[in-house]
Amino acid sequence: MKIVNQVVLQALGSNTQIKLHLGSGKSHLEGYFSVDLVELPGVDIVANLNEPLDQIPDNSVDAIHTRHTLEHIDNFMGLMAELHRICRPGAEIKIIVPHFSNPFFYSDPTHVRYFGLYTMHYFMDEVEQPGRKVPAFYTPTRFSLVSTRIDFYRTSLFDRLLVPFLRVAVNFNFATQAIYERRWAWLWTAWQIHYVLRPVK
């Protein structure tokens, strides 16, 4: 990785908490330092997210935002461990990725993994997991899951009329989300899924 913005180095050198926007591309979030594989204009840190973020100290990050990036990551378990390491206790991590039922997911040859309701449960102790239990022994990395939300496309008039009601019904609670994934996801496909996590330290 390479830190190209000296302000990042100054903040880290003074023990100031920073916020990171992973996979920023050409978009930028106010108050966040941009991280991308390509050194585009406005990118503050050039990094391959499949590799360690070795220039970012432990517990130095206050918040992370990433949108439609993690589906491109081969070393997903390694990246989650790195996010856990660099985030301070209580830091907020917002992740937005395509839902596994997204029909356009399969067209992108750079997509390498799917995401669903239970994906982040593999980073939680079983007693903390709502719904069905999944193995917690793949990694010692632990997060608490603050929230999960499933979103739907609104690309037609029919979508725009129905989706507001569908979104509320599906996201009413975890049980309704689980029923949607198990019974209805292939009848009315989703667009993306939002997770909000906090590292458990």
Image (spheres, rainbow, N blue to C red):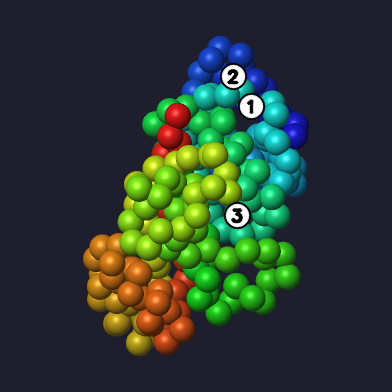
Q: Horizontal and vertical percent for residue 199?
A: 45, 36
Q: Is residue 184 above or below residue 58?
A: below
Q: Residue furthest top?
A: 14
**In the displayed structure image, the side of residue 47 where residue 176 appears, left or right:** left
User: Counting residues from the N terminus, which is met first, the one under dot 2 or under dot 3?
Assistant: 2
Q: Position of residue 196 (x, y in %)?
A: 40, 48
* Mark 2 or 3, closer to the camera: 3
| Quadrant showing the C terminus | top left
Label 2 to label 3, Cα distance in Å?
A: 25 Å
Residue located at (38% from left, 82% from top): 184
Q: Amino acid at mark 2?
A: Leu
* Image quadrant where residue 105 sits: bottom right
Question: Can you say which quadrant of the picture contains the N terminus?
Answer: top right
Q: Which residue is mark 2?
A: 12
Residue tagged 3: 70
Q: CA distance from mark 3 to mark 1?
A: 19 Å
- Given the image, on which type of amino acid does mark 3 rest? Leu
Q: Which residue is mark 1?
A: 56
Instruction: Decide: is 21 above or below 160.
Output: above
Q: Position of residue 84 (x, y in %)?
A: 53, 35
Name the residue type under label 1: Ile
Q: Depth check: 93 or 177 in front? A: 177
